[in-house]
Amino acid sequence: MRTDQSSQRNNSSGSEVSLDIPPNAIYNTSRDYIVQTEEENEKLNCCAFMTDRLRQLSANVFRKKTLYKRLPILTWLPKYNRNDFIGDLMAGITVGLTVIPQGLAYAGIAGLDLQYGLYGCFLGCFIYIFLGSSKDVPVGPTAISALLTFQTAHGQWQKAVLLTFLSGLIEIAMGIFRLGFLIDFVSGPVSAGFTSAGSLIIFTSQLKDLLGVNTKGDTFVDMWFSIIGDIHNISWNDAGLGVCCIVVLLAMRAMASMSFGPKEGKTCWQKFFSTLFWLIGTSRNAVLVIVSAVVGYYLLKTDIDIFRMVGYVPSGLPQLQLPPFSMTTIENSTSGELTEVHESFTHMVSNLGSGLIVVPLISLLENMAVVQAFANGKPCDATQELIAVGVCNVANSFVQGFRGNGGIARGAVLNSSGVRTQLSNLYTGIIVIVALLYMTPTFYYIPKATLAAIIMSAVIFMIQYRVIKPMWRSKKSDLIPGLATFVACLVLPLQLGILVGIGINILFILYHAARPRLRVETLSTSNDIKYLMLTPDRCLIFPSVEFVRNVITKQGRKCTLPVVIDCTHIYGADYTAAKVVSTMIGDFEARQQKLYFFNLQPRVAQVFESLHKDLTVLYDMNSLEMKLSGKEEDYSKL
């Protein structure tokens, strides 16, 4: 390596590289580097390295700080007081009244019997109390998770429960290996496109209960072809009830935001009516279900059968058992006879396909959206949320519940209800257990159109059309992955659509990495010696280095001036970069044109010199001027 500030020393024990940066360097640059002798390298064998890493991991796991981080209940429970109890009790009951109708409705989206929606609403709540890092996350099925469950398990409860179990294990593994950063590859536009498309698919899927028509198919397009083909079978009674329920729900939703009197200095009556309207609006789903069940009961008792009812829902708690690792179904054979078809564990897993990857990723995305929305500036721990939600879903699979996580709608209800700690999940879970033990006979009389209206009135607000205008103003190219994800999720199964969106987004990232910006300037020294200064704005790695080389070579060929590459922003390089730099130096030497590297960090210089020893690196303007003027300075004497 040929530099004006470095020297190589040889000794009997081996070679040692010394990079001595002049103390009068103008630019601030990293001076830390690693010098390792061959003798030291021999000592660091693989077994010693693994032993050291295991020792560090073991020490880290059993530290008090780690224990408090992985069991957040140890942080807030010792400080628990009476005010916390009251706040959590009110918030837990309020969310519990919301969860019951939502659980029933989301089971319908997943293509499962309604009891499976409630099975996934209580055990996870209890576990999240111990492992959850956010007080605003009520664990349970969501509209998006229900839709993904339907498109992955295709309405078979055994596969839905197995999906809950396996996706939970994957989430735990992702948490252990700190893979929460993967959600960083799902950008805002991709997330908005996915959520909007999912909302339209959910809305369309509920037309079967609202209108009484068939909505077969896994994609938005297939569903609409099915609806159009069966449009003549519309049940006008169900349609009328469903539309009325949607109008009532939207009106009650508006009631929740009504406030009487001024913001401050309200009278007792104004506070009372404001609280009453908020409570009615927040509990609108439960109120509507109760009223419609009473109406349905009255109609059936008077032999007026004009609405399709939910029907029988088994009462009692589910039996604690292992998830189904095999299944047997009854299918029609080609001869018209019923035959038993057995599916092994491996066959079931292969049928779940990409859902095993997409479902945990979207679950983390949904969960972190809730945590971040109500974090109030506090740091969010994606790793802990992965572990918490993963354990919750593994536990849910032992009570035949389908998967769940935090939902932004329930999180908003929980936050506005005055929640204080994660203990609110206890009261929510108790409400669900009470419903399973004593209220399931009343579910028989709930019209299907009512549950469809509850879902449809909720998902229309998940369509994120408001992000289009800000994206257009800030960066128009962000609309491309967003719209591509939206279209892909409508014409393809949802789990494939989101993968398409992520793939397009990664292509944008790679293109940006492969096309760095270079500032080109013609500068002069104090002696009026002109030179060409080129400044890349980022590190040199394999996607971008060839582009940078072409630009430097092109600019260098335009003139005979010395070329100086300002490496201030080059904080990393790889083998490909070193190989290209070596070729570039050879090209400049063949043209007898000078090429200097200015302010190159020592560790990057070591990468470059591995393939080309004749490298000139400068660290201050004085040394640069002396080089350009043909003078030399011996920095080894400094």
Image: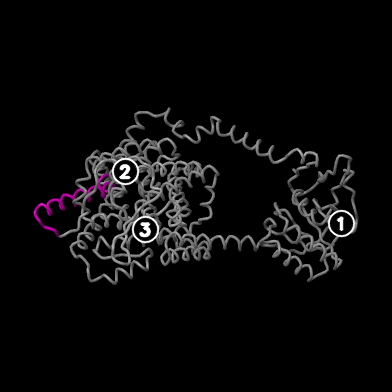
- Answer few, some or many: residues within 10 Å of disc 1's Cα (few below 14, many 20 plus, some between 14 and 19): some
Q: Position of residue 471 (x, y in %)?
A: 49, 62
- The span picked out in magenta is 279-305
**Residue beneath disc 3:** 154
Whether residue 503 sits left or right of residue 89 in the image: it is right
Q: Amino acid at mark 3?
A: His
> Can the viewer see residue 91 in this picture?
no
Mark 3 or mark 1, earlier in chain: 3
Q: Which numbered mark, 2 or 1, is in the foreground of this view?
A: 2
Pick the front one: 488 or 480 = 488
Q: Residue 304, located in which quarter of the rendered image?
A: bottom left
Q: Position of residue 380 (x, y in %)?
A: 49, 43
- Which element is circle 1 on? helix
**Residue beneath disc 1:** 627
Whether residue 220 sits left or right of residue 236 in the image: it is right
Whether residue 560 sits left or right of residue 443 in the image: it is right
User: Which disc is residue 95 wearing?
Assistant: 2
Mark 3 or mark 2, earlier in chain: 2
* In the image, residue 595 lies in the stretch drawn in magenta: no
